[in-house]
Amino acid sequence: MDCKRYIAEKLNIDGFDAGTVAGYIETPPDTTLGDYALPCFFLAKILRNSPVKIAENLKSVFVTDEVITECNAVGGYLNFKINRRGFAKNLLSEIAEKGARYGSADFGAGKTICIDYSSINIAKPFHIGHLSTTVIGSALCKIFRFLGYKVVGINHLGDYGTQFGKLIVAYKLWSDREKVIKGRLKELTRIYVKFHEEAKSNPALEDDARRYFHLIEQGDKESNELFDLFKKITLEEVDKIYKMLNVTFDSYAGESFYNDKMAPVVEELKEKNLLTVSDGASIVDLEEYGMPPCLILKSDGSSLYATRDIAAAIYRKNTYDFDKCLYVVAYQQNLHFKQFFKVIELMGKPWAKDLIHVAYGMVSLESGSMSTREGKVVLLEDVINKTVEKAYKVIEEKNPALKDKDKVARAVGTGAVIFGALSNNKIKDIVFSYDRVLSFEGETCPYVQYTITRCFSVLKKAGATGKVQEFTVPEMCESEYAVISELGKFPNVVKSAAEKYEPSFVTRYAIDLAQAFSKFYIDCKIACEDENLRNFRLAITDAVKTVLINALTLLGIDYVEEM
Ligand code: ARG
């Protein structure tokens, strides 16, 4: 049961829907005044009264019941006390009953949401810069699915552009099929870097590259075979990483997919008098909106990144009829998204408002470390492997007798990488630190995973795995109730994470719940003598296990039963 919602519905405030009011209801850290509080300040403007008066008026008509046992107005706040025992009973049976579905909802039913994420570039190394878009996008897919939406995860591959002409030139000069198949992405990076070095003293290489790129576009067989080989190798390499991170896609339609879908778009822009020619290039003038022009065609008639994105958005609308289309892309591309969203609006598409740039900050490594071997880039695969290795060492130290050390190290290592990237508000730039993400103390993934193993071990020792025994809820101490209160928040956390496109709400929540459990674990003897009390505390433990697993699953992180 969602107490906030329940209170909001009971209040039934004129002009405000229950969802909005529920969103304002807080759970005060100090519960002596109440278990829930509604600050009435946001109501003042519309209800044209002071928050103090509003709180008093609302109190005077509020009728308490078996769930909400007290309502008091204190200085612009409405404080509520609930029947904690009744709440705990309902909540624990709800969690036991729903299990892996606890926290899910169906308000997305019938709605489709496209999520463009990861969107890597072919033949370029998959580096640490792609971590955020990959894990944020993947978590959003899982969160929206959990809420009943139909989700289309799209990897908008960067598989178009003169760099492919360069690669073909470089391949012909300094590599061959065998070398590429053996050396894979590293070989492709090597020849790409070499091309740029050589082109400095030999600019004719650039002309060759442009020629080959045109050949690809014109459907030349040999050039396209090479291009397909580069693409295949890149996708096989990144697929290994996607597997490690539990990331999947429904579509790999990348930039080149729109080669034959742009002409009608350019036509439409012309018809709607949106195109102007400037220095031979075709642009959409956006001066009126305080932005530089959006480039549609270069003077040689070739298309640009924005042209492809406009065609892609229209294609997605026609194909999936999305309610929303999200683009999980670094904030460095803010202007690009603003520009092409504007162009779509100017084309008269009412759904332009449903295109959303979910911007995030950059991930970098602590200075110096790791960056030498690969030149400037730090490969994501190396970061994951190194984290898994470190996790393995920690396990060797702390629990050498553990079974399945490899599996545990993988879950802990990759979990640490994912959780680390999702721990901050997404717009912040973050510095990735191996030691920090792997710490068993503090606000880290291993801490959450460790808490889960603790739950498993308590339940196993008590012979209580599988089913929750009967109990009546006793008078609770603060640390017991604190866990109950956290458990009850989960459905709302998932919902807010979706509304704000902020998976970090889920990581934050997992930490809060794990911490509440740790306090409970220290303060209360779970496997105590009193049978009723023991069953109650085991039911709490079982619920914590379920909810922590649900939270990690939404983030694409595995758990283990022992570590
Ligand atoms: N491949 C691009 C890059 O690495 C990101 C593409 C994002 N998606 C999009 N529809 N523009 O910068």
Image: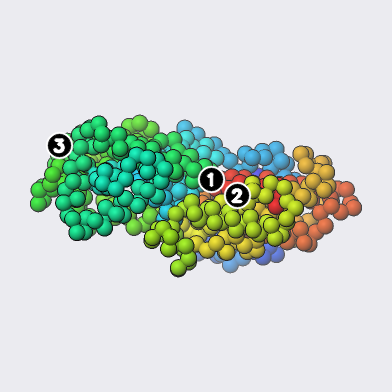
Q: Are marks 1 and 2 in contact (CB under 8 Å)?
A: yes
Q: Residues within 10 Å of mark 1 (few under 14, many from 20)?
A: some
Q: In this rendering, does residue 115 appear at all?
A: no
Q: Secondary structure at mark 1?
A: helix
Q: Earlier in the sequence, mark 2 or mark 3?
A: 3
Q: Nearer the viewer, residue 84 or 374?
A: 374
Precedes in sequence: disc 1 or disc 2: 1
Q: Which mark is residue 410?
A: 2
**Mark 3 vs mark 1: in front:** 1
Residue 152 visible in the shown view: yes
Q: CA distance from mark 2 to mark 3?
A: 56 Å
Asked whether 101 or 6 is in front, the reply is 101
The yes-or-no answer for disc 2 within 8 Å of ligand 1 is no
Mark 2 secondary-structure assignment: helix
Q: Which residue is mark 3?
A: 271
* Residue at mark 1: 244
Q: Position of residue 299 (x, y in %)?
A: 12, 46
Instruction: Please give the name of the residue rendered at 62% of the width and 56% of the height, measured from the top-left corner.
Output: 391
Q: Position of residue 57 (x, y in %)?
A: 57, 58
